[in-house]
Image (tube, rainbow, N blue to C red):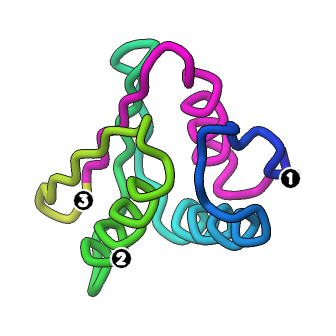
Amino acid sequence: MSDPAWVPRSCTLPTEERPLRVAEWDALFAERPASLSRPGPLRLRLGIAGGPGTEERVRDLVERESGCCSFFSFTVTPVEDLIRLDISVDEQHAAVLDALAARFAAGGRS
């Protein structure tokens, strides 16, 4: 999964920018992992450790991701010292959710 080839064709982010976006997600996952759950096959819930600027960082990344990958639905919820990030996709993009879960579980390492 070090190759961003798993990124679906429906993503409108220019190809040359995709490795940079993946690196942003990976950095967040490596620096701030807290918890991962899978409430359903098309839903992922990430707990991201809070801290100064973390909520803003997550919201910025989610906003930019939503702009190029309209199949994602994100909800950011601050909870005590945690940022809860709920992600859902349609059935066609379940593999993308699987890849994000695997990257999070690996701490951003592919």
Residue found at the far right of this picture = 3
Left or right side of 80 for 46:
right
**Label 3 amino acid?**
Leu
Mark 2 and mark 1 in contact (Cβ < 8 Å)? no
Residue visible at 35% across and 49% down in the picture: 47
Asked if the stretch drawn in magenta spans residue 25, the answer is: no
In this rendering, the answer to whether 84 lies above or below 55 is above
- Mark closest to the chain's N terminus, 1 or 2: 1
**Label 2 amino acid?**
Arg
Q: Label 1's element?
A: loop
Label of residue 82 in the image: 3
Q: Closer to the camera, 64 or 52?
A: 64
In this rendering, the answer to whether 12 lies above or below 52 is above
- Mark closest to the chain's N terminus, 3 or 2: 2
List the residue tagged with mark 2.
57
The residues bearing labels 3 and 2 have C-alpha atoms spaced at a distance of 13 Å
**Label 1 amino acid?**
Ser
